[in-house]
Amino acid sequence: MAEPVRGAQLVSRVSRILKVVSEHPDGLTAAAAAHATGFTRPTTYRLLASLAAEGFVDHDTARGRWFLGPELYLLGSLAADRYDITDAARDSVRALAKETGESAFFSTRRGNETVCLLREEGSFPVRSFVLSEGVRFPLGVASAGLAILSFLSEGEVDAYLAGVDLAERWGAQHAEILLRQRIAETRERGYAVNPGLILEGSWGMGATVFDAAGRPTWALSLTGIESRFRVERQAELGQLLLDHAHGVGRRLATERLGRAVRSSA
């Protein structure tokens, strides 16, 4: 297989390091960024310094930590009209947190990953902090990723699982045979359950939000401690997630139709 051209390799590295920085709202050191990306420390520092010079990352020299920079905010603002779908989900995320007392989230699919876009804290004082805005998980990992993966076509599921080894990074409970069992259970119930597979004692549940074409594109989810997700409560939480997921999907379809009408006027 031919080596990627240098320019494409550089773009890939820049993309990877920006994603890592985005997953740490409180910033991270260059050493931590190197560990997360697998790059050498000199390479990581050169990339961060070059990105800082263009305003794509920001360096807090007093704390030695790196953050996303102002230029990304400006670019994101310009892209928001086309891609921002959080407004349609915000009320549901808040309602789920208020009605259940758990932390509620809205995530989107990006390729073979899910990215958390919204988080709302519930009233229950003991919380799980596995997920927050910007955090990414592979499809099939965490309740949002399991919910989305479960409603892809059989061919897409087969192709995805043939190309990944989730057990290597996420533990034996993510072996293909066990993941396929959870996919079957999710399809039967309609919602996904993550019984503390990422962090012991931290449970989650998720429901798929479909786009106008019926594609599993987003997910609503809840996380909390194990005692809050007992079997007798799961049906209630699952139905709430499904109801809100349906509502978000309907609002997203309405908003996109409205944009299409306005752009053609």
Image: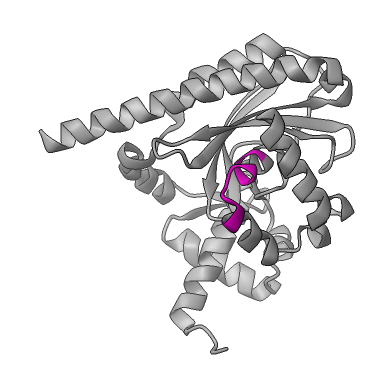
Inspect this view and state whether residue 26 appears.
no
Residue 38 or 50: which is nearer the viewer?
Answer: 38
Residue at the extreme bottom of the image, as rendered: 2
Could you say where residue 209 lies in the image, as x and y percent from the top left? Answer: 52, 32
Q: Measured from the top left, where is residue 191 in percent x and y?
A: 67, 30
Relative depth, front residue between 137 and 31: 137
Which residue is the extreme one toward the top? 99
Q: Examine the structure image and report whether residue 154 is included in the region drawn in magenta.
A: yes
- The residue sitting at 88% across, 55% down in the picture is 172
Q: Quadrant of the N terminus?
A: bottom right
Magenta-drawn stretch, dominant element (helix, strand or loop): helix
User: In the drawing, does residue 140 fall left or right of residue 202?
Assistant: left
- Is residue 139 part of the magenta span, yes or no? no
Q: In the rendered view, tell whether residue 172 sits above or below residue 135.
A: below
| Residue stretch in magenta | 147-155
Answer above or below: position of 263 versus 43: above
- Residue 30 in percent (x, y) is at 67, 61
Q: Residue 243 at x, y = what percent? A: 57, 18
- Asked whether residue 193 appears in the rendered view, the answer is yes
- Which quarter of the image is occupied by the C terminus? top left
Relative to the observer, which residue lies in front, 208 or 204? Answer: 208
The part of the image, by quadrant, that contains residue 224 is: top right
Left or right of 126 in this view: 121: left
Q: Is residue 111 above or below residue 124?
A: below
Applied colour scheme: one colour
